[in-house]
């Protein structure tokens, strides 16, 4: 491992640390406006949707129905009040049954 590797590692650590440090340093004890707080509280859901949606479409090559059934099952179990584990295990079970018969 040459010096380039260590500089790259240091740069990645710095780039990761700065966005976490700045709000903690400069916003400590200050109240954000409600509109900013509302936008920031919805970012995790938007990012999660952006990550999951392509996976639903491309989960199995040539068979978009596989992803649609999995997403529908996960949504239904979550909507009925299931936690993370029931959603994951229920979706895996439904897709295993679907794969067995199709």
Image (cartoon, helix red, strand yellow):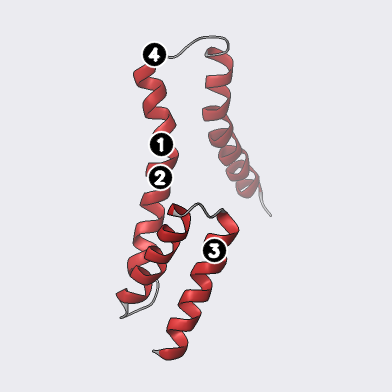
> Observer-nearest residue: 29 or 84?
84
Which residue carries the number 2 mark?
Answer: 47
Q: Position of residue 28 (x, y in %)?
A: 57, 13
For marks 4 and 1, give the CA distance: 16 Å
Q: Quadrant of residue 57?
A: bottom left
For marks 1 and 3, give the CA distance: 23 Å
Labels 1 and 2 touching (C-beta < 8 A): yes
- Label 3: element kind: helix
Of labels 2 and 3, the one closer to you: 3
Q: Is residue 66 left or right of residue 93?
A: left
Q: Residue at x 40, y 54 (%)?
A: 51
On the question of residue 59 being in view, the answer is: yes
> Observer-nearest residue: 28 or 42?
42
Which residue carries the number 4 mark?
Answer: 33
Q: Residue at x 56, y 28 (%)?
A: 20
> Observer-nearest residue: 14 or 71?
71
Q: Residue at x 58, y 24 (%)?
A: 21
Q: Tell me if mark 1 has few (under 14), some (14-19) or many (20+) residues whose alpha carbon lies within 10 angstroms of its own.
A: few
For marks 1 and 2, give the CA distance: 6 Å
Which residue carries the number 3 mark?
Answer: 88
């Amino acid at each position: 491992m040459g010096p380039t590797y260590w500089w790259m590692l240091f740069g990645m650590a710095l780039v990761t640390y700065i966005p976490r440090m700045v709000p903690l340093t400069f916003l400590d004890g200050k109240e954000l406006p409600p509109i900013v707080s509302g936008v920031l509280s919805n970012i995790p859901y938007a990012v999660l949707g952006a990550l999951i949606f392509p996976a639903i479409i491309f989960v199995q090559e040539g068979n978009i129905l596989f992803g649609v059934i999995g997403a529908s099952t996960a949504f239904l179990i979550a909507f009925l009040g299931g936690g993370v584990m029931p959603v994951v295990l229920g979706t895996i079970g439904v897709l295993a049954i679907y794969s067995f018969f199709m």
